[in-house]
Structures are given as structure tokens and as C-alpha cells.
Image: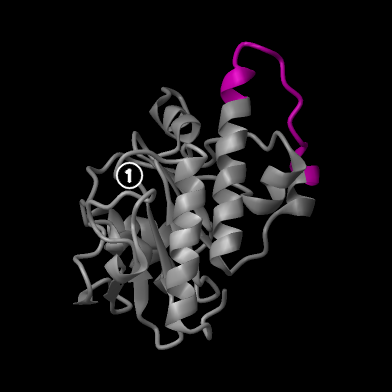
Amino acid sequence: MSACADEATARALIVRTARSLFTRGLTHGSTGNLSVRLADGALLLTPTGSSLGTVEEPELSRTDPNGRHLDGPRPTKEAFLHAAFYRARPSAHAVVHLHSTHAVAVSCLDGVDPADALPPLTAYYAMRVGTLPLLPYHAPGDSRLEPLAEHTARTHHALLLANHGPVVAGASLEAAADAIEELEETARLHLLLRGHSTRPLTPEQAAALAPPSP
């Protein structure tokens, strides 16, 4: 999926990806939202209050590049967060935000390093996520998060929102979904290994695999 893909293709891909994430337990209820940046610069997003398990193509919302509603149902209340990522990362064409269980659990732990919430336990985490800043808690839909998210997304394509969940941008929806799944699996490993001595990748090993800058 690239910026030049047609809207019909983008709608089908969003719904297919949403179903996959939901049916495999990576989100639940009416949590989580997906978006794709279209060739004309508009954003196509899942709507507010929708479940990724049941949302249909005609129910998707369109906004302008700043997250202002253009047509379709009202967009997710976190449209501003998606818009912030796209402004910060010109190479991004998709954003995925989930409330995946293990990543959310990490976001609730005391003493997490705000500069990097998870250790690079595996090569694929280092390749697909890299470092993971933890942003301070804001209530869902609180637009005061927008400038902080935009600033941080300039140097990181994946963020963890405290007591909330992960947000990941990618060059395609497939890439963003793969990265957020890798993040969730690493969070699960991190929690399973708590209390055990671990051997994460060295800084040199992780740096050699780090995702490219935007």
C-alpha cells in the first residue's frame, strides 16, 4: 500500500487488516484504530466507536491531512494522533493504534524508561520497532497529546502511550501492522521474563538492525 493506491483498494485493505487484528486478539471491543494516507493527501480512518471486528468499508471516514472531518461517519477521536504522525513522517502511509494486552501492561508498569520502554530482546523487534518512547498519560481523545506525539514521531515511528497502548506508523499498512505485532510479542516476552536474567541484543547489535530514519 503506497500513497498512490486508489481509495477502493485502501478501504478493502483497512477492513481486512482490522479483521485480522481483531480476530487474533490484538485488540478488543471498540478499541484501536487504523488509517491510510491517500494519494490526494486525505486520510482514510476507522470511525469513532467502531469495532475492528465488524467495521465495513462504507463506514470508514475521510479527513484532511490535519484530521478535520471531510466525509463519511465521524472519525476516531484520535484522528489528530494519526495526523500528527503523518506530518512528522513524510514516508509514512499508514498508522495503527491498538490496545493490545501486553503492550498496554508494559505502559502501566512503574519505573519504565520513558526514552525506551522495551529492551531489544529479538532481532525482529530491533528491525521493526527499534526504540520505543513512552509518552505521558493523556485521556483518549485529548488533543494536548498532539504536539508531543508529532515531535516524538519525527525520530521514532513507534510510540507507547502510558496506560493506553502503542501507535506505529509504516510505509504501508502491512508494515505498520507487522511492526505493532512485533511490539506486542516483545512486550509479552518482556513480561514473561520479568524476574529472570535476560540477554537482550547489545546496543551495537540493535543499532545495526535499527529501522531507517523517515
In percent of width and height, residue 194 lies at 60, 16
> In the image, what residue type sits under mark 1?
Thr
Q: Position of residue 112 (x, y in %)?
A: 48, 29
Residue 9 in view in this figure: yes
Q: Residue at x 27, y 75 (%)?
A: 63
Assign the magenta stretch its main secondary structure.
Answer: loop
Q: How is the image coloured?
A: one colour
Q: Name above or below for residue 159 compared with residue 70.
A: above
Q: Residue 147: percent from the left, percent from the top?
A: 31, 61
- The residue pinned by badge 1 equals 31
Left or right: residue 173 versus residue 68 is right
Q: Residue at x 67, y 64 (%)?
A: 212
Q: Is residue 202 magenta?
A: yes
Q: Residue at x 36, y 48 (%)?
A: 32
* Closer to us: 206 or 101: 101
Instruction: Give the SS element for disc 1.
Output: loop
Q: Which residues are magenta?
A: 190-205
**In this rendering, is residue 193 above or below 36?**
above
In the depicted structure, whether residue 185 falls above or below residue 92: above
Of 130 and 51, nearer the camera is 51
Figure quadrant of residue 30: top left
